Image (cartoon, grey):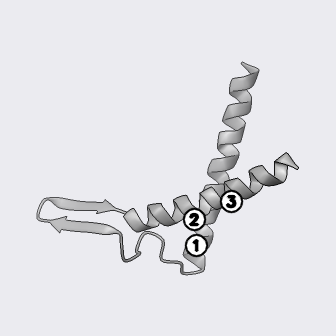
């Protein structure tokens, strides 16, 4: 039970940080979700939206950050 509690606390902190990052990107006018490679199809019955370019950009940034943190922790 203790491990589950720690995992839930870590997940909560990560969600809080991601939410804060999203709020900051909105305040600074960064166009996340509206990049040129994002796919948006509008039809008479609804809208299909797939943020492809945004997903790739976030993935690259998180990969670099995670690699830096892991290298720093190994020293």
Q: Is residue 64 left or right of residue 72?
A: left
Q: Nearer the viewer, residue 64 or 42?
A: 64
Say which label, 3 or 1, has the lower sequence index. 1
C-alpha span from label 3 to label 2: 17 Å
What residue does disc 1 label?
25
Depth check, mark 3 against mark 2: the one in front is 3
What residue does disc 2 label?
22
Q: Which residue is rendered at x = 60% and y = 64% of the image?
A: 61
Q: Which residue is rendered at x = 59% and y = 67% of the image?
A: 23
Classify mark 1: helix, strand or loop.
helix
Q: Which residue is rendered at x = 55% and y = 74% of the image?
A: 26
Query: Can you give x and y, in whole percent of width and height, for residue 13 in the image?
Result: 70, 47
C-alpha span from label 2 to label 1: 5 Å
Query: Can you give x and y, in whole percent of width and height, for residue 66 in the image?
Result: 68, 54
Query: Can you give x and y, in whole percent of width and height, for residue 71 in the image?
Result: 78, 53
Quadrant of residue 60 in the image? bottom right
Q: Callout 3: 10 Å neighbours few (<14), some, many (20+)?
A: few
C-alpha span from label 3 to label 1: 17 Å
Classify mark 3: helix, strand or loop.
helix
Q: Is residue 26 left or right of residue 11?
A: left
Q: Is residue 66 left or right of residue 59?
A: right
What residue does disc 3 label?
65
């Amino acid at each position: 039970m203790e491990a589950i509690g720690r995992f839930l606390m870590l997940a909560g902190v990560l969600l809080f940080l991601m939410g804060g990052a999203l709020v900051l990107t909105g305040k600074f006018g960064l166009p996340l979700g509206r990049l040129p490679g994002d796919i948006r199809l509008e039809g008479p019955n609804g809208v299909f939206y797939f943020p492809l370019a945004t997903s790739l950009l976030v993935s690259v940034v998180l990969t670099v950050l995670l690699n830096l943190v892991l290298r720093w922790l190994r020293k």
